[in-house]
Image (cartoon, grey):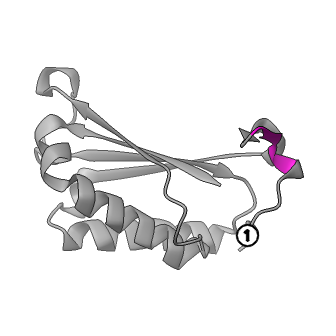
Amino acid sequence: MSQIKIYAQQYTIQTYRQLLSDAIHHALVSALQYPKDKRFQRFIALDSEDFIYPQDRTENYTIIEISMFEGRSTDAKKQLIMQLFKNIEAIGIAPHSVEITIFETPKENWGIRGQHAPDLALNYKVNV
């Protein structure tokens, strides 16, 4: 399970929303063997005065926060991060203007589809 939050300026979200969505999802599928039909993303478009970032970043500065069950290997998380940079660069946003944070929590801290997550039957592996 993963939930993705994407923060950027309004213009960047409007211009790149679908491309970012696809780039992020393809990275999850590739690096974490995530199911192709599972996409949980929230785009948070900010006015420029509400999004302060270092001057050496571009106007397309984007923050990606990934919340997911713990259990992925360090190599799998590295592959995910590097694939995200590659996919996002391919759509026109420089890697220097992208920051990615992964937050992992135990399954017992999640409730999904009316169930406690450890009781869910998942159609994908978490330990990759």
| In this view, 67 is above or below 48 | below
Q: Position of residue 116 (x, y in %)?
A: 84, 40
Pick the residue in front: 14 or 65: 14
User: Residue at the spot x=24%, y=40% of the render?
Assistant: 8
Taking the image as shown, residue 17 lies to the left or right of residue 2, namely: left
Residue type beneath disc 1: Asn
Which range of residues does the magenta coloring cover?
114-118
Task: Give the residue displayed 79% in from the left and 46% down from the top.
Answer: 106
- Residue at 83% across, 54% down: 120
> Quarter-wise, where is residue 50 in the image?
top left
Residue 105 position within the rendered picture, expressed as x and y whole percent measured from the top left = 72, 44
Q: Which residue is mark 1?
A: 123
The answer to whether one can see residue 82 in this image is no
Q: In the picture, which quadrant includes the N terminus? A: bottom right
As drawn, the residue found furthest toward the right would be 119
The picture quadrant where one finds residue 21 is bottom left
Q: Name the secondary structure under disc 1.
A: loop
Side of 41 relative to 107 (left or right): left
In the image, residue 76 lies in the stretch drawn in magenta: no
Q: Residues within 10 Å of mark 1 (few under 14, many from 20)?
A: few
- Quadrant in the picture for residue 88: bottom left
Front-most of residues 79 and 7: 7
| Residue 4 shown left or right of residue 88 in the figure | right
In the image, residue 128 sits, relative to residue 51, either above or below, namely: below
